[in-house]
Amino acid sequence: MHMTLRRPIALTRAARFAGRLRACASGLAFMEFALALPVLTTLVMVGLETANLAMAHLRVSNIAMLASDNASRVRDSIDEANIVEILGGAKLAGSSIGFAQHGRIILSSIEPNTAGSGGASTGQWIRWQRCDGAKVVASTYGPEGTGQNSATLQQMGVSGSTIAATTGTAIMVVEAVYDYQPLVSSTIFGPRTIRYESAFNVRQRTNQALTNNAPTPVAAQKRCTTYAA
């Protein structure tokens, strides 16, 4: 007698289901997206942070150039009231990155000194200096009065790109320093301090002293001993 062995119905159905599951591709795209999502998210975050860092560099650079250019354009003589306007405008230009709260702008008037014999110029000196912003940082070149009676300060700027004022004129040097505020996370680039300098020779100004002769005199609140936004 011939007998045929049959597989249990439940086992047969399970085998068919397993076969259909192996052949199913309906969730493939979803699985690929789930695997790629962490990488995609990381790339987007790094891209956003990179763009934000580049924008911060551009903004700080523009602040330095704007302030030094405006200070050099003040004709005849320069007053404390002019300084308030110049530094206030620079901070306003950096409002989108919180420059006033996290940065510092230092404006120095660089002129030839008369430390040599017979009043001859032998170097440069910082005749006056004004600052604004809450970041605690000092000028790279020293405080107001540096180099007045000596030849210690010969030029301003980094090696290979230095300048010096000539007799009867002055250079408006601005140092803009800013603690970068990350958009996504500081772990991407780490803590960064952005620094830019800009310098313009004065135009049509014969009196280089800083006066306080405006119709409504202002207090010299922009002295570099004050740190406030």
Image: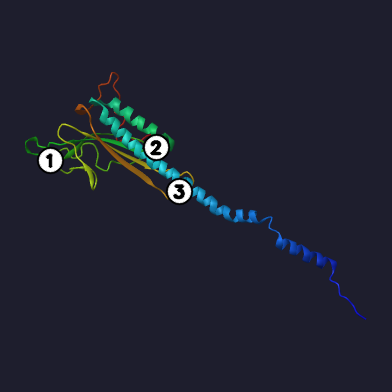
Q: Secondary structure at mark 2?
A: helix
In the rendered structure, find residue 45 and report the number of the disc placed on it.
Answer: none
Q: Which residue appears at 54% of the width and 50% of the height? A: 41
In the depicted structure, whether residue 85 falls above or below residue 150 = above
Q: Answer with left or right where residue 85 lies relative to residue 45.
A: left
Q: Between marks 1 and 2, how big is the CA–CA gap?
A: 37 Å
Question: Is residue 35 visible to us here?
Answer: yes
Picture residue at 85% right of the left edge, 66% below the top = 9
Q: Residues within 10 Å of mark 3 (few under 14, many from 20)?
A: few
Residue 96: percent from the left, percent from the top? Answer: 43, 35
SS label for mark 3: loop
Q: Which residue is mark 2?
A: 99
Cα distance between the residues tagged 3 and 2: 17 Å
Give the colour scheme shown: rainbow
Q: Amino acid at mark 3?
A: Ser
Q: Which residue is mark 1?
A: 122
Mark 3, residue position? 186
Q: Quadrant of residue 12?
A: bottom right
Amino acid type, label 2: Phe
**Residue 196, image x and y in percent?**
32, 42
**Is residue 190 depicted above or below 70 in this figure?**
below
